[in-house]
Image (cartoon, helix red, strand yellow):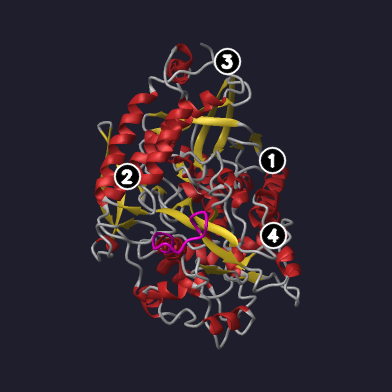
Amino acid sequence: MQIRERHEHDVLVIGAGGAGLRAAIEAIATGASVALVGKSLLGKAHTVMAEGGIAAALGNNRPEDNWRVHFRDTMRGGKGLCDWRMAQAHAREAPDRVRELEAWGALFDRAEDGRMNQRPFGGHTYGRLAHVGDRTGLELIRTLQDHAVHEGADVFMECTVFRLLVVEGRVAGALAYWRPTGEFVVFRARTVILATGGLGKAWKITSNSWECTGDGAVLAYDAGAELMGMEFVQFHPTGMVWPPSVRGTLVTEGVRGEGGILTNSEGERFMFRYVPEMFEGDYAETEEEADRWVEGDRVRNRRPPELLTRDVVAKAIIAEVEAGRGSPHGGVLLDISSKRSPEYIKAKLPSMYHQFKELAGVDITVDAMEVGPTTHYAMGGVKVDPETGATCVPGLYAAGEVAAGLHGGNRLGGNSLSDLIVFGRRAGAAAAAEAKDLDLINVADGELEDAARQALSPFSREGGRNPFSLQEELQQVMQVKVGIARTEAHLHEALADVRRLRAAVDGCSVDGGRAFNPGWHTWIDLHALLTVSEAVVLAALERRESRGAHTRIDYPDSDPEFGRVNLVIRSSDGRMVTDAEPVAAPPDDLRRLIEEGV
């Protein structure tokens, strides 16, 4: 078997979402040649699903907002497990990165005085999310892709990387295939940046797009990198629950940021009963106070409890449903029509208006939405250096959702988009700087051809299992046994199920040719899906406490000892093993800031 197509670059960026695009732009700015490889079409990356806004302490709405407040909010939201160096860099640099987007052509919404408008979001002390209606991710992608192409990135669309090439411990490039044709392509590079996003497609109900199968985390793991924080999977509180065909589709937090309220079947605004001790005093205690805050009096009043952190709101919704106070289709009601005019809703939330109108036959300017938690975001991922995004594999970097450290046990809404551009830039700069001193490494043709033959193996089997049925079974296992609330018994069952399914992958068969073959694409994805699923289950078993997005019914309280460690997963003799590593302690001034406030 001969692999004919080969490309050579200084830096290979895998993933063409916000982090990958920003990394490519920065690497090119230093003089590096860059290949940008995307699994989907350029502009279709999952970043477009980040709708509500991008978090940055610009101070446009409240002049007292600054990086220190944003840092504190992020650290408290992450329940003690954020890497303080990443949280500090993120909070400090996000405003400059947002202004940079504006300079490159991003058209953010404006306040009456002409400054960039910023809306409130859960867990943020002040309204600090710059936004473009409820289509912010789309504007970010549009701006970055235009700039990356203009600057000279070599773009490879609809191209799936399924193996990193490693020679004597150093990354040397990647082996991929074209999705439309099935033909293989080799990318040789001096350094590689992973920016592949999340892993939500391991669950049945998810807001994630089809691309989010954990590819980057497993590419890194297979190459010898470490994973961290894999037990922390965020279930966004508000996904659509009806009709079944769109269950899990994201309902932006911007609805609550603009004044939307959550009620149960009895008409009660139930979030007032779910304010955790950590946040007592930070949120309104009455509906009247919350309404005054929404109406604009934000100095004398506190923000509504609907704007608590996502882990708290998601668990509260589940509790209401389990108590028999859910909506007709197993969620709760999210209502903005009673708080805002139809004109305001259509102007501020145009995507949500059209989404419910077209998909559910609901006019959100008149009626409430039915919502419930949906698998949304992975706080865990590849363990990286907090300054550069470097992994423990020489020449390999990671940025964005695929990288762990910034968000700890729970991510605040809006921090994902600023994460992409802050750490995408840092990884791009570091990878390009390292590439200057390296030569391209040759990879033996025999190794490449063996990997290609293995990838084609399901075509040579007849009568084997359909990859789609295996993926469906995995999603059901993860949904039922590794969801919001977990138990040791369910996790042990899930681990056995995942390992059984992993053994079944090699018995799958695929019909037809290689061109446009979704069965084959799914079979390739299953390696990543099953690997990240096993990592999530192992880490969830090991963390015997409840913290942030990880809830153990059998260990309902947070354990101070677990609050000082992150769980790291690595490969040892072909087995996945977990170790506890201490969380780096912040300097005293930052520690006091986290504990006492600004």
Q: Residues within 10 Å of mark 4 (few under 14, many from 20)?
A: some
Which residue does the numbered mark 1 point to in the structure image? 152
Residue 432 visible, this angle: yes
Q: Nearer the viewer, residue 591 or 352?
A: 352
Magenta residues (range): 320-331
Between disc 1 and disc 3, the foreground one is 3
The relative height of residue 165 versus residue 30 in the rendered view (above or below) is above
In 3D space, how far apart are the residues under numbered discs 1 and 3 (Cα atoms)?
34 Å
The three-letter code of the residue at mark 4 reads Asp
| Magenta-colored stretch includes residue 322 | yes
Between disc 2 and disc 4, the foreground one is 4
Q: Earlier in the sequence, mark 3 or mark 2?
A: 3
The location of residue 93, given as percent across then percent down, is: 55, 64
Circle 3 — which element?
Answer: loop
In 3D space, how far apart are the residues under numbered discs 2 and 4 (Cα atoms)?
40 Å
Q: Which mark is residue 363?
A: 4
The three-letter code of the residue at mark 2 reads Val
Circle 1 — which element?
Answer: loop
Q: Nearer the viewer, residue 257 or 174?
A: 257
Q: Earlier in the sequence, mark 4 or mark 1?
A: 1
Which residue does the numbered mark 3 point to in the structure image? 513
Between disc 1 and disc 2, the foreground one is 2
Between disc 3 and disc 4, the foreground one is 4
Circle 2 — which element?
Answer: helix
Q: Which mark is residue 537?
A: 2
Circle 4 — which element?
Answer: loop
Q: Earlier in the sequence, mark 3 or mark 4?
A: 4
Q: Residues within 10 Å of mark 3 (few under 14, many from 20)?
A: few
